[in-house]
Image (cartoon, rainbow, N blue to C red):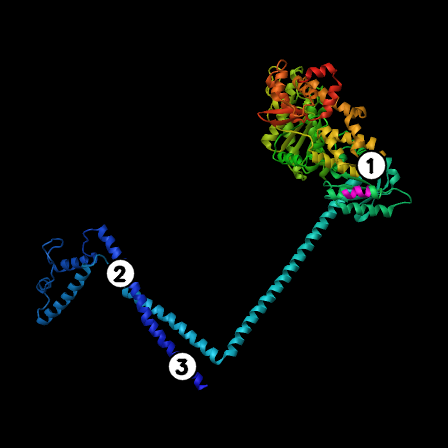
Amino acid sequence: MFKSKLTFFRWLVFSVIGLVALWMIGGNLLASLLEKEIDREIAQKVKELEEQYPDPEPNDSALKLEAIFLKEFGMGEIGKANVQGVLKFENYMGYHPDFKESQESKDEFENIRESLDRYINSQISKPDDKSEIRSHYARNFRRVVFLILSSIVLAGGVLFWYLQYRPNLFLRRIIITFQNKFVDIVINLIFQQLDREATDRLKVEVRNLAFQQLAQEATDRLKVEVQKFLQKAGATTSDNGKHGLQITSAAGKLKSYIPIPVSLAIEQPDAQDVVDLVQQATKMKKSNQQQAGIIFYREPPDILFRLRMAEVRLRDRFILIPIPLTAVEKSLQEEKESSGLLADYTERYLPGADLFDDRNAIGDTLTFFGRGELLQRLEENLRRGQGIGIFGLRKSGKTSLLLQLGFAMRENPLVHIDLQTYGSKPHYGAELFNQILSKLFQLIESRSAKMVSHPKLFDSDRPAAHLTTEFTQQLQNLTQQLTEVGYQLPILIFLDEIDRIIPTETDAKERAEECNAFFGALRAVSQEKRSLSLLVADVHPDINRINQWKQPNVPTNPVFNFFKEIFVVPFSADETTRMLTDIGNLMGITFDEETQSEIHIRSGGHPFVSRQLASLLCKKVAKENESNIQFADAQRYLSKPFTYSGVLKDYCGQNIWSDIEKREFQSAMAIIRLLACNEKLESGIPSSGILKKLQNQFTESECLDALLWLESVGLILQQESGEEDEYQIKLPLLSQWLRMQMKPQEVQEWQIS
């Protein structure tokens, strides 16, 4: 034990000696380095001062001291080169006559004078008032180094002793401390994780409860609306708990399927909804009765829902009737529409129904295909208040697009007006104003629990120009009420068949003024209040391109270049294939790839023509080939469709050609004839060839206008080739129909040799 202690003290002595040596050598070395650095800085500063002040004057403080003495003792003059102020005892005696002269006083005085003189001379010799700091820095640096090294040695000695004589205790304390810290950290982490998990579970439970409550409230509201709809349609219902409703009696074709389960999907229906509906129908099934069910949905179904629906229709012979809730809400606003809507969807989805033969605008989102990107773009533009003009051929899907757009923007108040009945009326503005105000009032009334005052309607024979101010005021009041009951702005106004109210050259002046007043009022609200978005639909974009009407002394068109023009183009090959496949699945019919490709080519991608060709094949081929349509069996019907389908023949003649004839669009008619009679040219006709052939009948500008419109609506196809464009007919059925109307001699006259 004593030996160990002796070893410890030996190491301690050596450490202290080493510390002192390090302090003396290292400290002095570092201090000298610091002094040299300070000397360099002072020399650099002196050099800078000498360059800045070439003739340095004596130090200010010393001069002040000298001046005090000279003034105090009255010795000499300051500032003269040949005068040097010297403090003499005789002068001091003269200045102070009460001072007694003695040798002792004189010696003491001389000592003080010499000391002051040395101090003044030493200060005057310096260029400034800097004090000597080198020794100050050196002393402080040595102290700091000594304290640091002493602390290190002391701590090292204590640590050495602890490890030498108490190693177990030392290590034990370290381990225990580490273990305690580690355990504390782990325990804290565990409790934090438990707290986090408990908090997350609580949040999830609260969120689920809130969602379930909201979902239940939404389901209850939908139940009330659906019950009201079914009652108006002549059906009797009962509550079926969480599963929805049950139809206990109904008129028409649904009568043989009673009881019918009704499912409600507050969002997008999925495949499980189909399974649940089938299970409910199975429980209600009577002996040898075919099962049926109705599902009301908010969002358009996804692909899995479509596949499961097709599966149960084919495998289980289950009749599933999907009805969009937006259509239900719309029908409730009209007294007689509910029964018609239910009958329409029943006819559509009962066994044997031809889903391809849809000749009216498609309001069923389940059988509406393509246009997804276009719908999104239109929705974004309308929400920004952008005026939109949708143009395209008749039966190209414009009205169907408006219906689907209304479904997508159901949170916005919508007024959709078909203008076909306003074509012959000289004053139609008052009726249109009344229709807009009445429709908005109905929307408010359907959501408001309190009584709402009906807007003041106008006499139908009053000119629109006299009503615009009052109409604008009433529209603003209704706009405020719409926001109060939960609608979003802007208000949407869709005007279909806009050409029916555009003034023609033969119309009276009053009709042009009526058009200006009506559209001027709507444009003012749209631009100034930003509370209304206007959309028009037509075949031709005249409403947006005619600035001055033909009637004299009538102001210019208020919506000239106001609308963003969007043309409804034909489907791509993929879109046509998907439409044929999905609708075919619902009907239990399949098409081979060659048949689908030929349908797309013959129709030019126009969805109405594609559907009618598919419908023709379903009637002529599907029944004989177990619902499997092959191209070998379909070719004869696709090559001569007009022989078997009057619908297709009338479409080409009435919806396309007659419309162009009525418009007297002679240049467009000539180009179609030219391309139809030269259809066998694989590369098409170059633009120079078209202009050369028609140069005696039309100007180049007329030909270019016709080419642009024909390409925009999808009747011709433009292809870039070399230095100029080439054109072909995009709708071969139109060429085929047109050649049927021409004699062989006429066809030959239009051919290019």
Q: 626 or 612: which is nearer to us?
A: 626
What's the CA distance linking mark 2 and mark 1?
107 Å
Q: Quadrant of the C terminus?
A: top right
User: Would you call the spot at circle 2 few (<14 residues within 10 Å), some (14-19), or many (20 or more)?
Assistant: few
Q: Mark 1: which amino acid? A: Ser
What's the CA distance linking mark 3 and mark 2?
44 Å
Instruction: Give the mark, 2 or 1, whose residue is nearer the N terminus.
Output: 2
What's the CA distance linking mark 3 and mark 1?
108 Å
Q: Which circle, 2 or 1, is nearer the viewer?
A: 1
Q: Is residue 237 above or below residue 52?
A: above
**Does the CB distance between marks 2 and 1 fall below 8 Å?**
no
Q: Position of residue 525 (x, y in %)?
A: 61, 30
**As drawn, which residue projects farthest toward the front?**
753
Q: Is residue 4 above or below residue 66?
A: below
For disc 1, the marked residue is: 627
For disc 2, the marked residue is: 39
Q: Quadrant of residue 319?
A: top right
* Residue 394 forms part of the magenta stretch: no
Q: Position of residue 729 (x, y in %)?
A: 68, 24
Q: 80 or 642: which is nearer to us?
A: 642
Q: Which residues are magenta?
A: 307-313
For disc 3, the marked residue is: 9
Q: Please indicate whether residue 15 sits to the left or right of residue 193 in the image.
A: left
Q: Position of residue 588 (x, y in %)?
A: 81, 38
Instruction: Give the mark, 3 or 2, whose residue is nearer the N terminus.
Output: 3
Residue 358 visible in this rendered orientation of the protein: no
Question: Dominant secondary structure of the magenta stretch?
Answer: helix
Q: Is residue 155 above or below residue 136?
A: below
